[in-house]
Image (spheres, coloured by chain):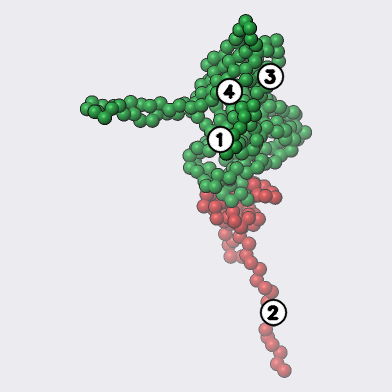
């Protein structure tokens, strides 16, 4: 077993790395239990599993004087009521590590100022796309030339589609385009789906139904004299 | 001695199968654009690309 420490966790929101402000993140899922108990049920109540639900909460340090675009107060205040794209990486941002993606509705943002402790912020997010777990296909890194990431090998193809999350934390020039590509033999690849071209800091989620072949990788096309700093989480369904 | 009428024929070259890419194909060393006809598709990829409808074989007209 390889236990991990919470200090290596990362949370990206809308292309911004919130980890520098956060003290803790809790993210998880639940499944509704739909009651199907009918009359004459002496054995007790009966339930069927319903839909999955994903949620995320965070707690961090408050710096209200920092109102730059990448400050936690600015980001969370702007996202309230919006639908930020979040990527939560409980075991850090390294290729192949596990993570969770959320296309979320931010439902709360609080600034707490206890009289004898540090000021802090809390926020809550409700996923609108269920609970999507995946693997990191491209750890956060700067790319200034087109290429492809390392291959994720699922050992088998699957038939239920995928979702993928892109976090773009920096762009120079006109940026570029990132896509998800798959292959049956890890030799010849074809495009599964690409994200919209990235020209500014931001985040995107894409989802596609159907077959996903055994091998998957991120590919990126960087426009001339440009660069992208990005991270990709791939969630096979 | 009678002269042989046999003249040596060149060794027949193996026929390279040609395929039309129906989508962009990303090979290890190059990209084949959709619509392009090529004989450079890796041998191990041909079967699955055909079965998934991503390439189609170009049939020569007897020439």
Q: Which mark is residue A70?
A: 3
* Of labels 2 and 3, the one closer to you: 3
Image coordinates of residue A178 in percent, x first then y, are 65, 35
Residue at image position (62%, 41%) is A217
Chain A display color: green
Q: Earlier in the sequence, mark 4 or mark 3?
A: 4
Q: CA distance from mark 4 to mark 3?
A: 19 Å
Above or below, A203 against A115 in this view is: below
Chain B display color: red
Q: Quadrant of residue A40?
A: top left
Residue at image position (54%, 47%) is A155
Residue where numbered disc 4 is placed: A25
Residue where numbered disc 1 is placed: A134
Q: Which mark is residue A113?
A: none
Q: CA distance from mark 4 to mark 1?
A: 18 Å
Residue at image position (58%, 32%) is A99
Q: Which mark is residue B8?
A: 2
**Residue under disc 4 on the same chain as residue under disc 1:** yes
Determine whether label 4 and label 1 are within 8 Å by CB: no
Q: Secondary structure at mark 4?
A: strand
Determine whether label 4 and label 3 are within 8 Å by CB: no
Asked if residue B23 shows in the view, the reply is no
Is A144 situated left or right of B51 in this image? right
Mark 2 nearby-residue class (10 Å; few <14, some 14–19, many ≥20):
few
Q: CA distance from mark 3 to mark 1?
A: 26 Å
**Residue under disc 4 on the same chain as residue under disc 2:** no
Q: Secondary structure at mark 3?
A: loop
Is A54 situated left or right of A137 in this image? left
**Residue under disc 4 on the same chain as residue under disc 3:** yes
Q: CA distance from mark 4 to mark 2?
A: 80 Å
């Amino acid at each position: 077993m390889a236990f991990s420490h919470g200090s290596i966790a990362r949370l990206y929101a809308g292309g911004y790395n919130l980890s520098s402000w956060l003290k803790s993140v809790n993210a998880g899922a639940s499944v509704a239990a739909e009651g199907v108990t009918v009359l004459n049920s002496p054995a007790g109540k009966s339930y069927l599993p319903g839909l999955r639900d994903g949620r995320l909460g965070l707690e961090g340090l408050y710096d209200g004087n920092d109102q730059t675009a990448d400050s936690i107060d600015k980001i969370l205040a702007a996202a309230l009521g919006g639908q930020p794209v979040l990527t939560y990486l409980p075991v850090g941002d390294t290729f192949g590590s596990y993570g969770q993606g959320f296309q979320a509705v931010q439902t709360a943002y609080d600034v707490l100022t206890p009289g004898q402790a540090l000021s802090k912020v809390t926020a809550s997010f409700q996923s609108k796309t269920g609970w999507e777990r995946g693997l990191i296909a491209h750890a956060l890194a700067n790319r200034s030339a087109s290429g492809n990431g390392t291959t994720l090998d699922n050992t088998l193809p699957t038939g239920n589609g995928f979702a993928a999350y892109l976090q773009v934390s920096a762009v120079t020039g006109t940026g570029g385009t990132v896509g998800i590509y798959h292959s049956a033999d890890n030799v010849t690849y074809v495009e599964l789906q690409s994200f919209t071209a990235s020209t500014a800091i931001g985040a995107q989620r894409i989802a596609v139904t159907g077959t996903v072949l055994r091998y998957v990788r991120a590919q990126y096309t960087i426009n001339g004299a440009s660069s992208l700093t990005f991270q990709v989480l791939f969630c096979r369904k | 001695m009678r002269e042989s009428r046999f003249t040596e024929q060149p060794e027949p070259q193996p026929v390279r199968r040609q395929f039309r890419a129906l989508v962009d194909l990303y090979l290890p060393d190059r990209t084949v654009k959709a619509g392009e006809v090529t004989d450079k598709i890796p041998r191990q990829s041909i079967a699955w690309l055909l079965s998934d409808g991503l390439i189609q074989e170009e049939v020569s007209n007897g020439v």
